[in-house]
Structure formats: C-alpha cells, structure tokens
Amino acid sequence: MSAELDWGNLGFGYIKTPYRYVSRYTHGKWDEGALTEDDKVTISECAGVLQYAQTAFEGLKAYTAKDGRIVTFRPDLNAERLEQSAKRLEIPVFPKDRFLQAVDMVVKANRDYVPPYGSGATLYIRPYIFGSSPVIGVKPAEEYEFRMFCTPVGPYFKGGAKPITIRVSDFDRAAPRGTGHIKAGLNYAMSLHAIMEAHRQGFDENMYLDPATRTYVEETGGANFLFVTKDGKVVTPASDSILPSITRRSLCYVAEHILGMTVEHRPVKFEEVKDFAECGLCGTAAVISPVGRIYDHGNEINFPSGMDEMGPVTRRLYETLTGIQMGRLPAPDGWIREIK
C-alpha cells in the first residue's frame, strides 16, 4: 500500500518516514545494527561531531522502475566513497556489505514511500556516520554511530531543467591536499556562506577554481562540472580536491561506452571554458543541471546551448542515464540493485 502523498507535487525536502537504520561503534567494533522508528539522535553535548565536525555522509536514491521493481543505483560506489571519507577523518569504516544490507533494509521497510514510476519523484536515501562520544581535546572520538534514513522527494526541476546562471567564486571550496575529495560535512559547512552570497547576488551556484593557482576549474559546492566541446567531446575536470561524483562517473561511462563519444578527464583551465559548447553540473539530486551563463567579475560567458533548455549532448546524456535508472534502458552489469 502506497503512502498517501501527492507524488506529483513533492518538493525536494525532508518528510519523515517510519523506519531508519542505526549501528553503533563501541569497544572497538560495530554492533549488529537494526531498524528503529525513533528519529531522534541522543548524544553527549561534547560529542566529537559537535566539537570537531567528525562526520561524513552519502546520498543515493531508490526508484520504482518501469517494470514495477524497486531498485537503487550503484549503491556499492556510495559504500566505497563513505569508506574513503571515514578513513580520511579517522572514523572506523562501516563495512561495505553491511552498508548495502542497510540500504536494502531501509528501502524495504519504507517501500510505501517509494514514489510510483512516472511521478518524477524518488526516495532519497541519506547514510551518515559521526563521532558520538565526548571529545574535548583535539582527537578522534572513541564511539560512533552509522545511521541511514530516507525521504521521498520530488523532481529537482519542476517543469523541466532550465539552464542556470552561476558565478566564479572568490572563496575557495577546499585547501590543496585537504578534504575536498571526500564527502565530509565540514566541506559543506564552509560552502554555505558562499552559496548564500551567490543567491543574494542573483546567481544559482558558484564555480570554484583551484585554491592553489585559481586558474583551473574545480567544482561547485555540491556537484562536478561536465563540459561538451564544439566537436562533441565530453570533458570533466580532474583534481585531487574534487569529490568523485558517482553521477559524473556514470555519465562519462554512458558517453563513452553507450553513446560512442570521446571522453576526457583532465585538468581544465578556466580560460578554456568560454570555448565549450555546453556546460552541466552533475549530482545525485538533479543528475545534470544545465548551465547557460557564467559571470566572472563583470565578464560573461554565454554558452551556445543558451538559456532556454539543455544542450543536445547534455540532454542525450541525461535521458540515457535516467532511462537506465528507471529501467527504460538496459543497465551495465552491477549498476542496478533490486530491493526484494
């Protein structure tokens, strides 16, 4: 029985669902973990996460496929990325097999909240891990919690994906050899002022340049860039301080192995950007957000794809990947995990 929600009019926000998963790390090991109906987190006022931001998270989705199956998209890569984030933050790794088991348990327990096929909505899944025991000296916590909840969300774009306008930010997203390559909460906290400043100035997002030289394109506060050259090549920026987006990696595979395009993953100089034909931002929420215009301190870059709709290559990539996710197109081996 489906939850009584207006699936076609959901926003992209939090709706409490009945069950979430919790596992606790004490005495040097993770407990067995279990589902709970309690959505409240109780921790010490001196918990490591509150004092020194010792936390990392992930984001993925469950879908109702065209054939009625409930599926998730490449959750193994989310498990692996959370493992890398945990190692960098001195958090004990939550095992990959148990991560996948938790995804299955949470989605299955909340299956009434998985939006129906064709509604444009999905079930967003948020796994996260944090230091829960008291820490007053600067050091890792001794106890941790791994938790996972889910919430139904509407389509990121209401009425279609219209190109957005972004600006080149004066702020740095990450430090050289810092934590930009992991999905740590602290990275997002430091981006909040920059994104609110962008919004106050009428822009949708920030383009961050490399913090060392400010001459290479990095990413936005929460998405990787994808460019299309005028001769149809797909180009994505390479940097040690860019988060390895699962959506971006999937789009590049689609471009090269399904659509037969040339793909380049390399450092991208900002001075090249004006010569590209299309630009998009890759992430779980929107898949691809098309960019129509970039402001750089009084100078404008206007992409030939324009401000009215996605460029033709970006649209092919978007429609192919969402077709795979929704079961309209065949998926590469291992990309789709069915929730039974």
Image (cartoon, grey):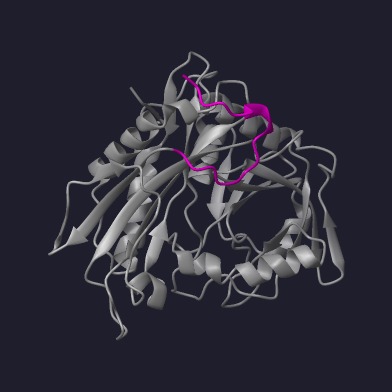
Residue pictured at 81% horizontal, 67% vertical = 201
Q: Is residue 50 magenta?
A: no
Query: Is residue 260 visible to us here?
Result: no
Nearer to me, 203 or 302: 203
Prevailing SS of the magenta stretch = loop
Which picture quadrant has residue 190? bottom right
Residue pictured at 57% horizontal, 70% vertical = 173
Residue 21 horizontal/vertical position (percent): 32, 44
Q: Is residue 8 magenta?
A: yes
Which picture quadrant has residue 152? top right
Residue 56 horizontal/vertical position (percent): 40, 60
Which picture quadrant has residue 270? bottom right
Q: Is residue 284 left or right of residue 168?
A: left
Residue 72 horizontal/vertical position (percent): 42, 32
The magenta stretch spans which residues?
1-17
**On screen, 234 above or below 330?**
below
Residue pictured at 53% horizontal, 40% vertical = 252
Nearer to me, 285 or 49: 49
Query: Is residue 45 visible to us here?
Result: yes
**On screen, 189 above or below 139?**
above
Residue found at the very far left of the displayed protein: 27
Q: Is residue 97 left or right of residue 11?
A: left
Residue 213 horizontal/vertical position (percent): 61, 77
